[in-house]
Image (tube, grey):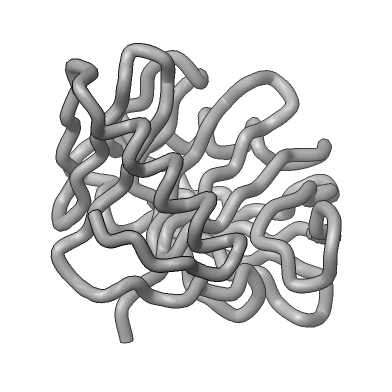
Amino acid sequence: MTKRACPEGLMTFEENLTRALAGEKLTATADGDRLTLTTAGGDRVDLTSGPGKPGTPLTGTKWTVHTVGDGKSAAPLPKDVSGKAHLTFGKDGKARGNLGCNDVTAKAEAKAAGKAGAKEGRITFGAPTTTRKMCPGDTMATERKLLKLFDGTARYDVERDTLKLTAADGTVIDARAATP
């Protein structure tokens, strides 16, 4: 480590990083190009194989759903739904998308937590309007889980290209920004 004086925010970051990596046993988890190292005390270091990307905006981005769960565990969507379920939050205050088989539209009023431009907050969803197709097997079960998000308030967190939504009942949905 060099002995340079860094601006206050960077110095704090370096001190925390050094503390997290110094001598403790780390648990590693990998997800695509991301590696997360976690100490027994809960300190985390998130690494990626590429340069950091600025956060993706909540509004205007097509968010493709990858997992749904209950906060303790999440499971990837079944094969017949994978890549089909998605949401887009419009500037008109509506969320539109697909639940894997049926289309969905609902009012969606997002309020960022704290300062303007924050990447976390709450979204108040209205009652959903859906198409009414009969869908096979796991598709309907997945759609019922995804519908728990609507007609209530959910927490959201955007980190780079990932959106995490937590419904009032504890249902957690992870989605990624669709690549153009």
Considering depth in this image, is 5 or 42 the residue closer to the camera? 5
Q: Residue at x 21, y 59 (%)?
A: 48
- Seen as rendered, the residue at the extreme front is 3
Question: Up-down: is 40 above or below 175?
Answer: above
Quadrant that contains the N terminus: bottom left
Residue 43 drawn at (x, y percent)? 41, 28
Q: Position of residue 53 (x, y in %)?
A: 38, 75
Residue 147 percent across, percent down from the top left: 61, 37
Quarter assignment of residue 150 = top right
Q: Is residue 29 left or right of residue 95?
A: left
Closest to the observer, 58 or 47: 47
State which quadrant residue 69 falls in.
top left
- Identity of the residue drawn at 63% across and 67% down: 96
Between residues 34 and 2, which one lies in front from this camera angle? 2
The residue lying at 55 percent from left, 57 percent from top is 158
Q: Is residue 145 above or below residue 72?
A: below
Residue 141 shows up from this direction: no
**Residue 23 higher or lower than 125, as above or below:** above
Residue 45 in view (yes/no): yes
Left or right: where 142 falls relative to 106: left
Q: Nearer the viewer, residue 10 or 79?
A: 10
**Residue 16 position in % (x across, y down):** 44, 40
Q: In the drawing, does residue 111 fall left or right of residue 24? A: right
In this picture, is 145 found above or below 157? above
Location of the C terminus by quadrant is bottom left
Image point 60% across, 50% down: which residue? 157
